[in-house]
Image: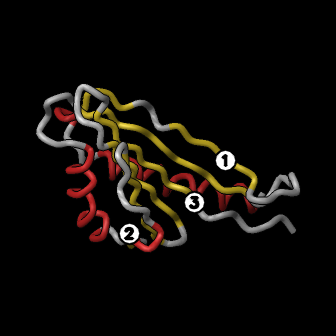
Amino acid sequence: MEQQKQLDGYMAKARGWGEEILAQIPKAEIEDAGPAAAGTRAANMNYKEWPKYYIWDTMVDLRQGGPRTPTVVADDLDPWLKDQGWKRNEEREAPAGTESFTRYYSREHYSLMVEAFTDAPPRAQTIFFTIVTPSTNPAP
């Protein structure tokens, strides 16, 4: 099936990019990083099987008292992401809240959200990453 082949390609690219992003945080700075949660969703409201898109997301808890906070990690990632071809969409971003902020990026019709929690320790020092693929072509 052509749509499944297309979706498989989108999934592989999202997973690969996700792993590259996570590799920018040294393991020594990470307290816990859950396995990436992922799954496909129907891209329409008619409950048809196709088109579909894929979501890859994971959260990383940084070590308490570690060298970087989630805000610093997000700031450090920004130029690297841009070098990798991600374009930041600041117009979509709301001002930082008291607990977190979210940055939005796009690349080849994929979207990336980086959400950094700004609560000071002992609250969890968490940063979330979500990649959403484009929708597959509709079924014929």
How many angstroms separate mark 1 from mark 2 (CA)? 22 Å
Of 119 and 1, nearer the camera is: 119
Of 127 and 7, nearer the camera is: 127
Q: At 43% from the left edge and 62% from the top edge, which residue is drawn?
A: 94
N-term mark: 1 or 3: 1
Tell me where residue 140 sits by quadrant.
bottom right
Residue under label 2: 86
Tell me where residue 32 sits by quadrant.
top left
Amino acid at the residue labelled 2: Trp
Residue under label 3: 133
Q: Secondary structure at mark 1?
A: strand
Crowd rating for badge 2 (residues with CA inside 10 Å; few <14, some 14–19, many 20+): some
Amino acid at the residue labelled 1: Thr
Position of residue 103 measured from the top left corner of the image (x, y, whole percent): 39, 60
* 70 relative to 96 in the view: left or right: left
Amino acid at the residue labelled 3: Thr
Position of residue 112 measured from the top left corner of the image (x, y, whole percent): 46, 59
Position of residue 87 measured from the top left corner of the image (x, y, whole percent): 39, 73
Crowd rating for badge 3 (residues with CA inside 10 Å; few <14, some 14–19, many 20+): many
Residue under label 1: 40
How many angstroms separate mark 1 from mark 3 (CA)? 10 Å
* 137 relative to 77 in the view: left or right: right
